[in-house]
Image: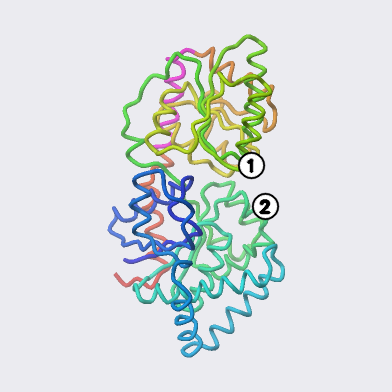
């Protein structure tokens, strides 16, 4: 069976879960064509560098290709073209991106539909319920190829009416959510008559994590935080928690892996708190470097304000490391207090400092037991190979696939 994956950027440094999902589907015998709107940046990870060569980019098609596809669509399917432009106006009118942006999505969809026909695609799947789902929906209407999308959140759910998530679900063969919390939010913003289309398929980790031998957490007082530097990830709360520990004469080191728009703000907060020796910045890192940083820490810390179900938590648990995170969204579906880590109220740097202090006071053996419980949960619920079997069944059940 031949399917297509479409998203805005692919590969992308924080979207390794898409690559794992594609690889797992291919291991099941499916052929997966990669389409994306554009390149985001040159990949750090060697695996992503290879994936970039396999991906076809709409915005690199060129004016002549776009014009050729548009003219052919108008001549062959004038009513269908008018229909998608009409739907784009309707959706764009109530969106925060406007009508013109949605008309541009129609042009992108015309090219995508053309490529899907040429490549004999039997099902089109979009990651994210934002513009990728809109483009896939229009392309499906033009090509007759069924489409589906994965809504990751939290942005899709916060802007659900503006994104017309209800309309995208209505037109889709099915929609995937990566947590029960995510499913509840898509149900919240859609009609009950379409709830049966919503499936939970978790993001997962692959054998490179699950087959890594468990190692007892180190005795050194080191934590790691792997996340984009953005307000939602709350690194500033983490800086405040480290400052409180320092004031109590509790020594620790925190490695911040990542980058993003708030890097300068976070670095300034570290300087103001005189924590340059305690908080270390690595920038973006390859998958192997991230794995090494997690293994060298006693626990992963992710004090987010807004998430759905962070993949980095699965990665840390698969590697046998406890996790300190917040009581929000799908995170409690992953982290079980006292069993696999600690959960604290979001924005509460005092509670975060206390949890980090407890992790520092916990023996490596006890931490290893928590890590083992975390790995078992990931094996049962977040193995990308097992989750891909669910997806394959959905694709085959809802596509034009004839076997």
Image location of residue 359, percent across then percent down: 54, 18
> What is the quadrant of residue 321 in the picture?
top left
Query: How many neighbours does mark 2 have within 10 angstroms: few (below 14), some (14-19), or many (20 or more)?
Result: few
Image location of residue 298, percent across then percent down: 47, 21
For the record, the magenta segment spans 363-379
Q: Is residue 49 above or below residue 162?
A: above
Magenta segment, principal secondary structure?
helix
Q: Are marks 2 and 1 in contact (CB under 8 Å)?
A: yes
Does 378 lie within the magenta span? yes
The residue under the point 56% across, 47% down is 180
> What is the quadrant of residue 331 in the picture?
top right
Q: Which residue is mark 1?
A: 306
Image location of residue 207, percent across then percent down: 32, 39
Q: In this rendered view, identify the residue nearer to me: 327 or 268.
A: 268
**Label 2: element kind:** helix
The residue under the point 47% across, 51% down is 41
Color scheme of the displayed model:
rainbow
Q: Looking at the rendered structure, which numbered label has been put on residue 158?
A: 2
- Looking at the rendered image, the quarter that the C terminus falls into is bottom left
Gap between marks 2 and 1 measured at Cα? 10 Å
């Amino acid at each position: 069976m031949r399917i297509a994956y479409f998203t805005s950027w692919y590969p992308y440094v924080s979207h390794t879960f898409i690559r794992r999902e594609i690889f797992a589907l291919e291991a099941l015998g499916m052929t997966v064509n990669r389409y994306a709107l554009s390149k985001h940046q040159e990949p750090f990870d060697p695996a992503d560098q290879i994936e970039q060569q396999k991906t076809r980019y709409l915005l690199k098609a060129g004016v002549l290709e776009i014009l050729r596809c548009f003219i052919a669509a108008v001549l062959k399917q004038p009513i269908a073209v008018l229909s998608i432009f009409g739907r784009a106006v309707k959706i764009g009118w109530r969106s925060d991106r406007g009508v013109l942006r949605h008309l541009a999505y129609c042009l992108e969809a015309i090219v995508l539909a053309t490529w899907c026909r040429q490549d004999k695609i039997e099902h089109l799947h979009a990651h994210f319920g934002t513009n990728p789902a809109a483009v896939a929906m229009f392309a499906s209407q033009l090509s007759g190829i069924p489409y589906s999308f994965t809504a990751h959140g939290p942005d899709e759910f916060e802007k659900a009416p503006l994104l017309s998530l209800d309309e995208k679900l209505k037109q889709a063969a099915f929609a995937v959510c990566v947590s029960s919390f995510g499913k509840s939010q898509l149900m919240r913003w859609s009609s009950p008559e379409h709830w049966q289309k919503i499936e939970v398929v978790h993001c997962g980790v692959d054998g490179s994590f699950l087959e890594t031998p468990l190692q007892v957490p180190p005795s050194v007082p080191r934590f790691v935080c792997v996340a984009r530097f953005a307000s939602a990830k709350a690194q500033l709360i983490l800086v405040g928690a480290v400052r409180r520990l320092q004031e109590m004469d509790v020594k620790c080191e925190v490695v911040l892996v990542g980058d993003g728009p708030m890097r300068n703000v976070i670095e300034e907060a570290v300087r103001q708190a005189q924590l340059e020796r305690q908080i270390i910045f690595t920038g973006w890192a390859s998958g192997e470097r991230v794995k090494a940083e997690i293994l060298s820490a006693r626990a992963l810390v992710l004090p987010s304000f807004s998430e759905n179900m962070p993949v980095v938590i699965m990665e840390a648990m698969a590697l046998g490391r406890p996790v300190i995170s917040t009581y929000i969204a799908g995170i409690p579906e992953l982290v079980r207090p006292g069993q696999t880590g600690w959960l604290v109220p979001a924005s509460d740097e005092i509670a975060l400092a206390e949890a980090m202090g407890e992790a520092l006071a916990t023996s490596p053996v006890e931490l290893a037991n928590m890590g083992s419980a975390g790995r078992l949960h990931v094996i049962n619920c977040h193995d990308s190979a097992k989750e891909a079997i669910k997806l394959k069944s959905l694709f085959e059940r809802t596509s034009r696939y004839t076997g």
